Image (cartoon, rainbow, N blue to C red):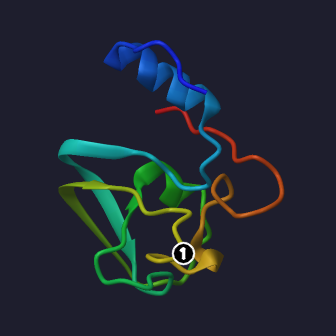
Amino acid sequence: KYRKCQTDESFLEDYAKNNTSRTCSNSWDEPRLLITCHDCSNDPNACYCLKCFLEGNHEGHKIHVRKEIGSCDCGDPSFLKESGFCRVHKHSDNKSQDIEF
């Protein structure tokens, strides 16, 4: 079913309301804190936004914190082990919850 053409802003609002993705969609184009957990990564470039990192369990893990441009990989099994997903992006039968930034 096709809809009328939307403005960029209305498209993003509509997408955010209806997105059932189980991955974090947080990305940034100016340097911000990002965290790599070497114990949870499947890829050396995988990283978490601060919110997802704090919502996960990384106690005793080897982590690296830096300020860079990037995007969060939480919820994406090609980058992170499922055991490393935060509580919001853990894969389950339930629709994922949104994190407000």
Residue 70 position, x and y percent, is: 25, 55
Q: How busy is the neighbourhood of tag 1: few (under 14 within 10 Å), some, or many (20 plus)?
A: some
Residue 35 position, x and y percent, is: 35, 65
Q: Nearer the viewer, residue 15 or 46?
A: 15
Residue 20 position, x and y percent, is: 65, 44
Mark 1, residue position: 77
| On screen, residue 19 above or below 95 | above
Disc 1 marks a residue whose amino acid type is Pro
Question: Which residue ends up furthest to the right in the rendered image?
Answer: 93
Q: Nearer the viewer, residue 49 or 18?
A: 18
Left or right: 18 as drawn, with respect to 14: right
The residue sitting at 65% across, 78% down in the picture is 83
The residue sitting at 50% across, 62% down in the picture is 74
Q: Secondary structure at mark 1?
A: loop
| On screen, residue 18 above or below 97 | above
Query: How many numbered discs sit on the rendered protein?
Result: 1
The residue sitting at 40% across, 45% down in the picture is 26
